[in-house]
Every structure is written in structure tokens, then in C-alpha cells.
Amino acid sequence: MVDTKIPDAPRSITRGSTLKDLLDREAIDCLVLNVGRVYRRFDGASFRRAALRGLKPLGILQRGQHLASALREHLPERYESAAEVLIRSLGPPLDGTDEFGLAPFFYLPHVCFVGAYGVDAKHNGGDDPFETSMKAQHELTRRFSAEFSMRAFLLHDPKRTLARLMKWTRDPSPHVRRLCSEGARPRLPWAVRIPAFIADPRPVLPILEALKDDPELYVRRSVANHVGDIAKNHPKLAFEICERWLESASTERRWVIRHALRHPAKKGVAAAARLRKRAA
């Protein structure tokens, strides 16, 4: 792992600033430094010009995609080689699950890179890039979150991707375990929706079952939000899940149930209100 630098960032957005400011000149300079240290052929000056061109009007997600495109032009042509460069350029993983402020958004371009170029073999000389992409996302989610890039794999190859996420529910990192739930949410905010899981969320239920009693609230909150997503299209199924989870439920699991059903309960759905009351 190289001696990396990421931009200074506030703990939250303050007056006069926006999220897109997190991916501006300082972030581009840090990318030049970090990538240049592990990839000597990296043309930092050319990358900086490409990164700044057209950047100003873009929002935070568009900037992540724009910088990923600029990286694509300046990293090895074969995706597998390019992804390895990015992995070697990463800083240390997050320590714990406490609030880390907005600094991890620096890795949004890396996540966008994997989502854009890590699915299709055409970017990898015709060879399947799945394992390289899973490795990259495993590393990235421990520093930021790979919930956005994981969507591309769930859309393209749901069976294989769900199998990997199921395996990761036993990962020692709470960031990886959270990704298993958060990345597969059918209605994840800011992200591309997963129509198949909106229509039928049952393929993801084993992941939620595996994580419902996770020792980290950080992970359990994602499980609760995921069940809340399910309740928007399949309220009966969500209520059945929570009903089953109430049996011999710990204090922590009862919180998951209450959090999952808070929105339908506020809308006056009687079944949700009853379950929340029982989980109190």
C-alpha cells in the first residue's frame, strides 16, 4: 500500500459548500499523486487536464463518473490491469464504523470506474473481469462504499453476484457485510434501481436473514432500510418477515423491525403499526 493522500473534507456539508466540491481540484491532485506513485507511466498532467475539462457544472455523482472516464483514458487499456493500479493506490481501510465525515467520497471515481468498466469482458481483452471487480469492490467498500458499483453486477449477473454477497455476509469487516444488504437494496437512494428485486425481492432474503442479528448497528440499519424498501412494493411480504423475526427477538432485532416499518406506520398502515408496537 502506497503512502496516499486524500483531500481534507468536513464532517458534513456546511453553508456555502456542496457535495460536488468534494471532487474538485484538490481531489484531482490527490488522484494524480496516488496513482502516479504506483503506475509510473501515468501522465498526471494529461489526466489533470481531462479531469478538469467540463467538470464545473457537474454534480457529485456526475463528477465521479467523469473522473472515472478520465482515469480510463490514462490507465492500462486492459481493465484487470487498470483495476489493480487503482487497488494499489488506495489508502488504509476505515477504522471501525463511526462517523468519518465526507472524506471517503474521494473514492467515488474508483467505484464508478469498477461499475462502468468492470462488468463487460470487452474492456478486459475478452476475459471475464468478475473476480477482479469483486476484489476491487471488497477493497473499496472498506474505504467508502461499493453500493453504487455493485448494482451493475446485480443487474448483469444476479445469480453469481448474490452468491458472492451471501459469502461476504460472514466477512470480518462490517463495511463488507453492510455492502451485502445495502448494495442489493431495490430502491437504494441515488442509485440505479434493480427492477428484478422490486418485482420479486425473495432472492435477496437469505442475505437479510444472515445479517438481521449482525453485531454492528451499522449493518443492522442497512437490513432495516432494505426491509423498508421491500415494504413499498410488497408490504405483505415485509410484514411476514418482521412477524417471523419477532419470535425470540433480541432488543437489537426489535429495533430493526421498528426501523424497517417506520414509514408505513406513519402512513397509518395498521399492520405496520401493530408490529412496531409489539417490537417496542
Image (tube, rainbow, N blue to C red):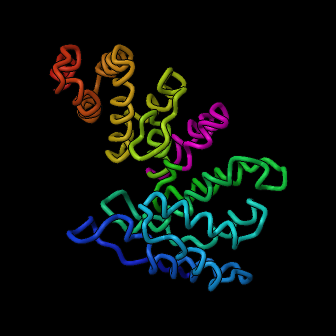
> Is 198 left or right of 10, judged from the image as shown?
right
**Image quarter of the N terminus:** bottom right
Q: Residue 205, percent across and down?
A: 48, 26
Residue lying at 56% horizontally and 70% vertically, measured from the top left:
90
Q: Residue at x 69, y 73 (%)?
A: 74
Residue 105 horizontal side relative to residue 54, left or right: left
Quadrant of the rendered structure where residue 67 is?
bottom right
Residue 173 on the magenta span: yes
Q: Nearer the viewer, residue 94 or 6?
A: 6
Along the viewing direction, whichever of 174 and 105 lies nearer the viewer: 105
Compared with 172, 49 (above or below) is below
Which image quadrant: the C terminus? Answer: top left
Q: Quadrant of residue 251?
A: top left
At which x and y percent is residue 209?
44, 28
Give left or right: position of 79 versus 44: right
Residue at 29% of width from left, 71% of height from top? Answer: 10
- The number of discs equals 0
Question: Does 85 sit above or below residue 62?
Answer: below
Residue 158 at x, y percent in the picture: 62, 33
Q: Of all residues shown, which one is farthest toward the right?
A: 126
Please, is residue 204 above or below residue 76 in the view?
A: above
Direction from residue 100 to residue 121 in the image, left or right: right
**Which residue shows up at 84% across the image and 50% down it?**
126
Q: Position of residue 97 (x, y in %)?
A: 36, 57
Query: Which portion, as a residue range, is magenta?
Result: 149-174
Asked if the magenta segment contains residue 233, the reply would be no
Q: Main secondary structure of the magenta part?
A: helix
